[in-house]
Amino acid sequence: MTTRKLLLLPGDGIGPEAMGEVSKIIAILNDEAAAGFETETGLVGGAAYDAHGAAISDADMARATAADAVLFGAVGGPKWDAVPYDLRPEAGLLRLRKEMALFANLRPAICYPALAEASSLKRELVDGLDILIVRELTGGVYFGSPKEIVDLGNGQKRGVDTQVYETYEIERIARAAFEAARTRHGKVTSMEKRNVMKTGVLWNEVVSRIGRDEYPDVRLEHMLADAGGMQLVRAPKQFDVIVTDNLFGDMLSDIAAMLTGSLGMLPSASLGAVDAATGTRKALYEPVHGSAPDIAGKGIANPIAMIASFAMMLRYSFAMTREADALEAAIAGVLEAGTRTGDIMAPGCRQVGTTEMGDAVAAAL
Amino acid sequence: MTTRKLLLLPGDGIGPEAMGEVSKIIAILNDEAAAGFETETGLVGGAAYDAHGAAISDADMARATAADAVLFGAVGGPKWDAVPYDLRPEAGLLRLRKEMALFANLRPAICYPALAEASSLKRELVDGLDILIVRELTGGVYFGSPKEIVDLGNGQKRGVDTQVYETYEIERIARAAFEAARTRHGKVTSMEKRNVMKTGVLWNEVVSRIGRDEYPDVRLEHMLADAGGMQLVRAPKQFDVIVTDNLFGDMLSDIAAMLTGSLGMLPSASLGAVDAATGTRKALYEPVHGSAPDIAGKGIANPIAMIASFAMMLRYSFAMTREADALEAAIAGVLEAGTRTGDIMAPGCRQVGTTEMGDAVAAAL
Ligand SMILES: CC(C)[C@H](C(=O)O)[C@@H](O)C(=O)O
Ligand SMILES: CC(C)[C@H](C(=O)O)[C@@H](O)C(=O)O
């Protein structure tokens, strides 16, 4: 029998509550599909800092690298606002991304038909929306050096961050985007600020070349990132796959997620390169939403993004397409039936807590 | 009699057409209010490149610095896509900002009631919207060095951009934001990515201190820039003044502009420090929209953002409050009366071209 080793890193805030609901799904798949999932649980973020004074311990980091896939909750909260920069909760997530070399972050922005009304955009602009944002995740301003604050004396300091991209980093994320477009609607929009940034000039040049030489069947267009943000808000359905750097991807994917009205529903996958020998790749799956400390521990958080992240894992890490489809259909069915957590409550629906929502999805599955 | 020296830099695309309509307003103010405007016209962007091989000539740069205020159209277009980086149209605008030391970019995002329907957001979310984005304009990743592409051999290149902020730069833009908030609703939201960027850490620290020590009467809140982008799309009316860095400000102000549905209507002011001796400050005014090469030369561009930029000039550079109010009221009146260019056309309105729109505003004034 296959065994599939998962590391669960629930993290902070609503992370643990949401993760708890995934366990129900894992149990079902182990029982009914002999999926052979074996789970370990580790600490990350503020929880890890409280326990070992680091945003992730070396032991948990090693477990993450050894696992077949990692499921991640969320990190951060006001409790750790004064923690030194290198130990802050986010450092755990950034270390996982960097050391596991998870360069490709796939963020689907899908508008669940049952939730189109929840969007701040007019219904016709988002109904049926289905964009995939492919964000570069191990480079750019997140990791370049120098990254420092220098004391200049006289009460003056200088803060510096450095955005660096090399050709190979842009090539591989471009390929990830073009490959995804081939399984979708065959269009890639690349976004940068080549009119102000040299990394944008290089980005544009490399993406253009990869498109021309390797993916002539995929339609490629370029937009300045500021104009791209505007177009996302104006007419999001014009996009299929958007490929962009780490920082623009952070902003643009959050905005895209928000305009679907389905923020509490959206998963993401962070993928490494495929190992030529084993055919496997390192991967971490996490909801797009954050740790939401204001509602943590109240049993009201929406676990769907977390469950949908697990569905992405079934699809991308284990090629369990049938199970992934079934789980996504179960989520859509529960929403259609009018079962809602507080964040997506609507007139005529039935409001439930985190546990009941998890039970409802498990039952539908 | 006062003389007020203006440098007009129409630039590329729809810039010249839109600028032409401002001349009508200037003529009226000279005739009827003895405003004493004297105008010179210079070249910037692609137009300057075509004429002198630089995105702005030294002579025009000197004129800009000597003028009491600069009115700027727009730069760029596909014609200059292959121009070397240092000579590209945008370089003219960046040189003006840097050499005139225009560190404070004020971008009002106002939803004209007559146009609320044009927004992609639901009407109730944007109706009456009035945000002011205060964007730092002479620092950050736009100007830091190194900014370069290095050839590494083997077909590999490395692109680098550097974001730098020093304490004094953050102090002065924070003060600009707090001062503006005092004349508005007394609230400032500062946006950065302190969880990933050292410049964000410094930004947060300095803005907090200036708020605490100098503006205890103004409410200050902090948001991560990605969360801020989401909140802007979800519930824009929660904001009064937003203060942020050059790059986040570029993205966030464009998104804010787009969600008002009034992009073709929005002006901006870029201001330098007040000279203690003369009480004056260098200033450049420009529409938020770009050069729109696709509709240039057709006589259909909306000149209102350009005219509204001139109204901001009356207010900020010349303290001509009565005239600025009158001009803004004239614009609102023309819109209320149903006169519309193509970009803001709506059922039941009368569609006009650039010239007629300029005439309508002039007549209303
Ligand atoms: C938590 C934070 C470091 C992270 C990021 O900025 O990448 C988050 O916003 C995200 O988008 O995953
Ligand atoms: C034209 C370009 C250099 C400029 C910028 O990025 O600042 C523009 O987008 C703006 O917002 O004024």
Image (cartoon, coloured by chain):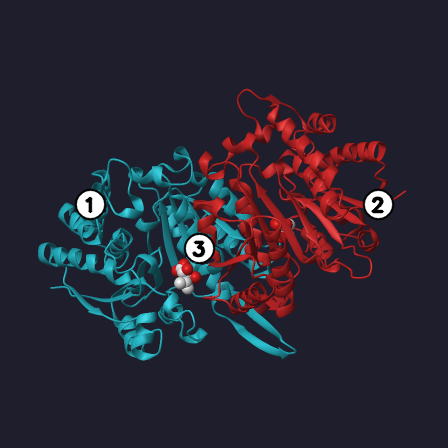
Chain colours: A red, B cyan
Classed neighbour count for the residue bearing mark 3: other residues with Cα under 10 Å, few (<14), some (14–19), many (≥20): some
Residue B196 vertical placement versus A304 (above, below): below
Q: Which amino acid does label 2 sit on?
A: Arg
Residue at the (15%, 57%) spot, across then down: B24
- C-alpha separation, residue under disc 1 versus residue under disc 2: 69 Å
Looking at the rendered image, the disc whose residue lies closer to the viewer, 1 or 2, is: 2
Residue B171 vertical placement versus A33 (above, below): below
Asked if residue B144 lies left or right of residue A49, the reply is left
Residue at the (82%, 50%) spot, across then down: A67
Ligand 2: which quarter? bottom left
Q: Which amino acid does label 1 sit on?
A: Ala
Q: Residue A227 carries which label?
A: 3
Q: Say if mark 1 contacts mark 2, CB within 8 Å.
A: no
Residue in the foreground of this view, choosing between A274 and B281 = A274
Dot 1 corresponds to which residue?
Answer: B330
Looking at the rendered image, the disc whose residue lies closer to the viewer, 2 or 3, is: 2
Q: Do circles 1 and 2 both sit on a common chain?
A: no
Disc 3 C-beta below 8 A from ligand 2: yes
